[in-house]
Image (tube, rainbow, N blue to C red):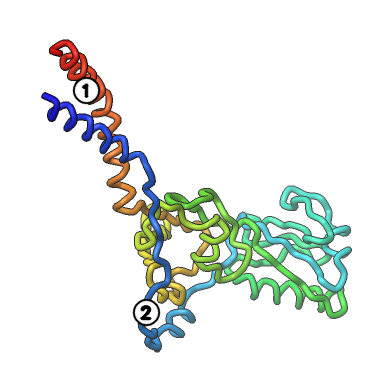
Amino acid sequence: MHKLTYAFLFLAVIFTGTSCSNKQYQVLFQQKKALSVDTGYAKREAALALYRIQPQDVLQIRNLQDTKFITNLTPVSSNTSGGNAAAGEAFQVAADSTVDLPAIGKTRVVGLTRVDAQKLIQDLYTKNLLVNPIIELRIINLKVTLLGEIKGQGNYPLVKDKTTLVEVIGEAGGLTDRANEKDIKIIRGSEKDPKVIDVDLSNIGAINDPSSLLQSGDIIYVGQSKRAARNDNLQNLSVIIQPALILFNTALIIFTLVKK
């Protein structure tokens, strides 16, 4: 009887211990051998389409030569949101593919990359109004969504061209201790035709993979490690078993004391 009691007490300790540390250490960028030169990388990168401006995008525009222009002379309208001289003024692209800019009026920008639109607007201001303007244009509504085993889940803006997966994960605080660095998915495309890109951050080659360059609307999901999943299962099992073990052990102890 004493042996049976000790056995159940031991089981209770084991199940209780499953709630202890379940820390998972990521092994990032650990490919030991030298990377072979990927001759197709340059072609793939060149083929990677940069984001092209769409209707409803919000463009932040400023003249680096004279920040008072574009800002102070901008009329307040339904397709213009507030801004300041340091950041520039924000303009929303209309459904007719144009953006209404001060002094030069409607300018067709849909289908252009950020760089192409910036050059077009700079050329128009040079031709019609300003002397040697330096126009800076940003698309400020682009974002990606981070979910799963990320320390800072949520939406993150794409503030520059060719933002990488590693940069956004770093901005979000990195992976959690429960993350599986080999199971990271980028979900991209429309609802009717979604595409899933698998990324393995345990391989340093992932840094140079053009598919890990993020696009607006991407959803990044970081999966849970097998170890963390096992610990969760054990913890769920222990929640069910622990009360029964406690009652059974208590009954055994009472029975043992009464027998004495």
Q: How far across and down, in percent of the image, does residue 173 sit?
A: 55, 56
Question: What is the quadrant of residue 210 in the picture?
Answer: bottom left
Question: What is the quadrant of residue 28 in the picture?
Answer: bottom left
- Categorize mark 1 by other alpha carbons within 10 Å: few (<14), some (14-19), many (20+): some
- Categorize mark 2 by other alpha carbons within 10 Å: few (<14), some (14-19), many (20+): few
Outermost residue on the front side: it is 260
Residue 112 visible to the viewer: no
Instruction: Write down the residue under mark 2.
Output: 32
Q: Looking at this view, is 194 or 45 the one in front?
A: 45
- Tell me which residue sits at (46%, 56%) in the image: 175
The image shows a total of numbered marks equal to 2
Q: Which mark is residue 249?
A: 1
Q: Looking at this view, is 137 or 92 the one in front?
A: 137
Image vertical order of residue 132 relative to residue 3, above or below: below
Q: Looking at this view, is 254 or 67 the one in front?
A: 254
Q: How far across and down, in percent of the image, does residue 15 sit?
A: 27, 36
Q: CA distance from mark 1 to mark 2?
A: 52 Å
